[in-house]
Image: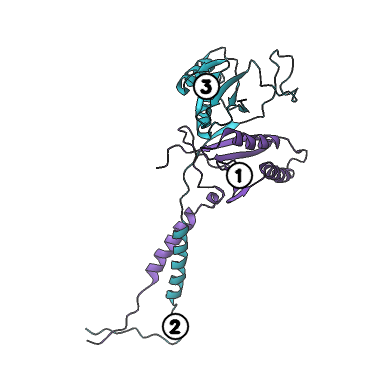
Chain colours: A purple, B cyan
Amino acid sequence: MEPTEGTPNLTPILDMVFQLITFFMLVINFKSASMDLSLHLPVVGSARPVEGQTDLLILNITPDGKINVYGIPQENIENYIAREAASTLLTLHRDHPDLKAGDELPTIVVIRADKSTPFTLLYRVITACQQQGFRHFALKAMNKSES
Amino acid sequence: MSRHRKRRKQGDVELNLAAMLDMAFQLLTFFILTFKPAPVEGQISLRLPPPLPIDAGGQKEAGEDTTSKELIKSVKTLTISVFAEPNGSVSAYGIGEAPVTTLSLLDKRLKEIFGAPDNPFEQVVIQVGKALRYDELMKVVEVCTRQTLPDGSKLSKLSFVEAAQ
């Protein structure tokens, strides 16, 4: 038998790989980069996932009371929150020029605190937010335990 | 049976897909390796105004005297106390001056208070022990947010204050 030259048809495999790439691109969640997934959130049965909120300030609070921003712990909590409030105020100034520092801000402060964080450290963060005009808070929790 | 290869006309271009497939596999590997599904997290939404002193007699407006450091005393504000052990667990609960032994009893008492037709309370101040762990606090917050106000809305106006040890 004469040896024959065979060229595999790569088109179907390429199609399949592109479909897989499309799937992974669609399910990739860039939002999770701002969340510190090493924190153990408390389990609260009535906590419900909420979608569609855009104006958020996510605070990852470690058991020693530090705020983790993209993995970098912020030493001075009050300064960090003041900076965030100033930048929010700057953005809001376009539509509300009469808004001044300390006025109520529409941003929702998302508190992702470790379940073992003592209240006194959490209270320091909440008070700092309130002083800067943040009033709307969302306390994050898991609605079933991770196992 | 003999097989005949199709003769290509001169000038026909055949795309080499192997290079594209290599690149596509590299992209696929990257996405597979970086894929980490984020856990579905729930939240309890609250409006947390800073605790402002209110005169019980109704002679002053809320927030008029912001220099006062005293705990809110108002007919419309219910104070719940949660005291902590040094290890962060709950040592005792209280509603106003009355001690409450368990969380389920706290829920029951709050249901009685908020379910009464003449319920005067619109907001809750939670006085919390400094060492109390966040998960223990969340249990109390959950109980509070379950309560329904006379207008049918859920209680979401809470304030926190630190309890003196």
Check disc 3 and report the residue beneath it.
B93
Q: Residue furthest front?
A: B86
> Mark 1 near mark 2, Cβ–Cβ under 8 Å?
no
Q: Secondary structure at mark 3?
A: strand
What amino acid does circle 1 point to?
A: Ile
Image location of residue A121, percent across then percent down: 60, 36
Please state the total of marks drawn on the protein image.
3
> Mark 3 near mark 2, Cβ–Cβ under 8 Å?
no
Check disc 2 and report the residue beneath it.
B12
Closer mark to the observer between disc 1 and disc 2: 1
Label 2: how many Cα within 10 Å (few below 14, some 14–19, many 20+) = few
What residue is shown at x 70% (from left), y 42% (from top)? A82
- For residue A10, what is the image quadrant? bottom left
Of B81 and B52, nearer the camera is: B81
What amino acid does circle 3 point to?
A: Tyr
Query: Could you tell which of marks 3 and 2 lies nearer the N-terminus?
Result: 2
Whether residue B55 sits left or right of residue A36 in the image: it is right
Check disc 1 and report the residue beneath it.
A67
Q: Is residue B31 above or below residue A70?
A: below
